Amino acid sequence: MLLYPYKPIVIMSTHTDLRVTLKEAMKAKDEVRLRTVRGIMTACTNELVATGRTPQDELKDEEVIAVIKRLAKQRKESIVQYEAANRPELAVPEKEELAVLEAYLPTLMTQDQIRPIAEAVKAEMGVEDKSKLGQLVGAVMKKLQGQADGGDVKAVVESLF
C-alpha cells in the first residue's frame, strides 16, 4: 500500500519543461511568466532555424541555457538603460522577466568560490604581472565553463595582482 500518491518521475529536457511551463502559465493566467516563457520559446525557435534545424526540433539543454543567458543579459542591459534614462516604469517589466529567466539558470559561483580556482590557474600558468591578465581571465573562464559570471571572474583575477 502506497502512503503517497504515485507520480512517475519523468526527466524532461529543458525545452520540454518550457513547453509544460507555458501551458501552466496559460492556465494560471500568469502574464509575466507567460510573456517570458513565450519569449524564451521564440528565441529557441530562432536558434534552431539559425543552426539549420527545423522549428519542430528540440535544443539540447546546454543550448537552451545559452539562449536563456543571452536573454537575461539583454534584460539586465535594458534595466540599466531604462534607469539611466530615468524611466523606471519601463524597467519594472524587464525586472519581472529577469526574475523568471533567472529561475531557469544554474546558480553561479561567488567570488569566494572563484578565488581558489583562479589562484590555481595563475600558479599553473606562471603569471606574475598584469600583462597576461586577459589570458588568465580566459583560462579561468574556460575552466569554470559558464559556472561563473565573467565580471566576477575578472574582478577576482584583478584582485590577485
Image (cartoon, rainbow, N blue to C red):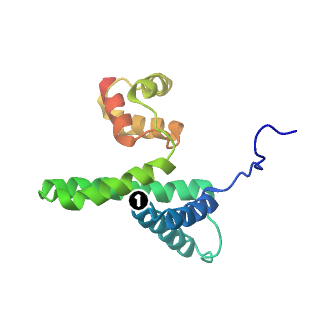
Residue 128 at x, y = what percent?
36, 23
Depicted 32 relative to depicted 122: above or below: below
Residue shown at 64% from the left, 75% from the top: 56
Residue 27 at x, y = what percent?
53, 66
Which element is circle 1 on? helix
Q: Residues within 10 Å of mark 1 (few under 14, many from 20)?
A: many
Which residue in the rendered view is the most extreme toward the left?
A: 86
Tell which of 26 and 21 is nearer to you. 26
Q: Quadrant of the N terminus?
A: top right
Q: Is residue 2 left or right of residue 91?
A: right
Q: Say whether residue 73 is visible.
A: no
The mark tally for this picture is 1
Depicted 6 relative to depicted 56: above or below: above
Tell which of 90 and 71 is nearer to you. 90
Q: Is residue 21 left or right of residue 114?
A: right
Query: Which residue lies under the disc numbered 1?
Result: 71
Q: Say whether residue 15 is visible.
A: yes
Picture quarter containing residue 96?
A: bottom left
Q: Quadrant of the C terminus?
A: top left
Residue 6 at x, y = what percent?
78, 47
Residue shown at 42% from the left, 66% from the top: 35
Tell which of 13 and 143 is nearer to you. 13
Which residue in the rendered view is the most extreme toward the right?
A: 1
**Amino acid beneath label 1:** Leu
Picture quarter containing residue 14?
A: bottom right
Residue shown at 31% from the left, 58% from the top: 94
Q: Is residue 26 left or right of residue 86?
A: right
Q: Is residue 12 left or right of residue 1?
A: left
Tell which of 130 and 77 is nearer to you. 77
Residue shown at 53% from the left, 36% from the top: 143
